[in-house]
Image (cartoon, grey):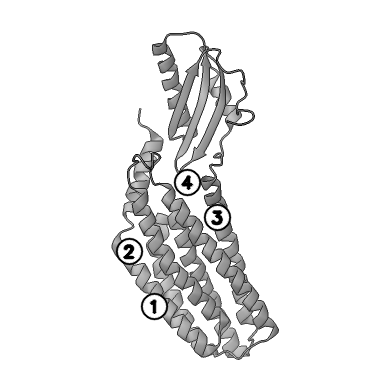
Amino acid sequence: MDDPVRAHRHSHAHDMSDLSGKKIFSVTVLNAVITLAEIIGGIVSGSLALLSDALHNLSDTAAIALSFFAYKIAQRPADIKRTFGYKRAEILTAFINSAILFAISLVLIFEAIRRWMSPELINGTLMITVALIGLIANIVSVLLLKKNSQDSLNIKSSYLHLLSDTISSIGVFIGGVAIKLWGIVWIDPLITVLISIYILRETGLVIKKAVDILMQSSPVLDYEAIKRDIEKSEKIKNIHHVHSWMSDEKTIYFEAHIEMEDILLSDAEKVCDEIEQLLKERWGISHITLQAEVNKCCDKNLFQSGNI
């Protein structure tokens, strides 16, 4: 029977292979152009929203390049130094990228509040022009990474950088129109705050998931249902000492002690094979380690009590 989890991982690898050097180079160049234009435009026009966009895009350039290199590192096979492989390189990059953007957003909120209390004159025409350049370039960049963002937390963190900047450019454009037509200068810091709050929410979710994986938190599984499924077999008395964790957002590891009747080792192996097939097909678990035993452990709890 085909392993759907393995097939999904192969599909994921194929999708990620589409993230070629040419794509990365194109997105990096686009972000460099946006950053330069918005830094100049922000300084000349006096727009904080444009400068906030410039900071975001500056971090985008580094984030996208880091994401690509992390993906390449993650493809390395396991070795004597990294027996689990290098998959967490992507998770580390996702955490770093998102944490940087989170910090930048907090700084911009405080700066926007300061601007709100002491408004400054802003050139609406220049603000509109630069915002349009940024919007077009960001839309192209988002479209280039959209497909890959669905399959990798790492690429998603970079995609969120670009998506936030696209939304930011729209906000800056609308703000420029309001300043140009009605002289509403306070809309510039308001847009900055709204954009930053949105970015804080999105990056916060990525940071939480990345930290969960790095801390080896258990994946979301119905462990009681898994226990019931496994203990349906007449040859199995109990499943206990379960440990589960993730090496990345796709790969779930699962290990457990399986108490059986006193049967032949060859029969025990067949039972373990059935359990592995169940866990892979019904629960999407990738890597399974089972320890068969007969009246060995005193602690029969699903999760081991006290220290390991």
> Image quarter for residue 223?
top right
User: Counting other residues with Cα less than 10 Å from the Cα at mark 1, is it few (<14), some (14-19), or many (20 or more)?
Assistant: some
State which tag comes first along the sequence, 1 or 2: 2
- Marker disc for residue 249: 4
Residue 111 drawn above or below residue 10: below
Circle 2 SS class: helix
Question: According to the image, label 2 marks what residue?
Answer: 23
Circle 1 SS class: helix
Query: Could you tell me residue 49's position as x and y percent?
Result: 56, 79
Q: Nearer the viewer, residue 231 or 124?
A: 231
- Marker disc for residue 207: 3
Residue 274 drawn above or below residue 22: above
Q: Nearer the viewer, residue 184 or 36?
A: 36
Q: Amino acid at mark 2?
A: Lys
Query: Does residue 305 appear anywhere in the picture?
Result: yes
User: Counting other residues with Cα less than 10 Å from the Cα at mark 3, is it few (<14), some (14-19), or many (20 or more)?
Assistant: many
Question: According to the image, label 1 marks what residue?
Answer: 33
Marks 4 and 3 close (CB-CB < 8 Å): no
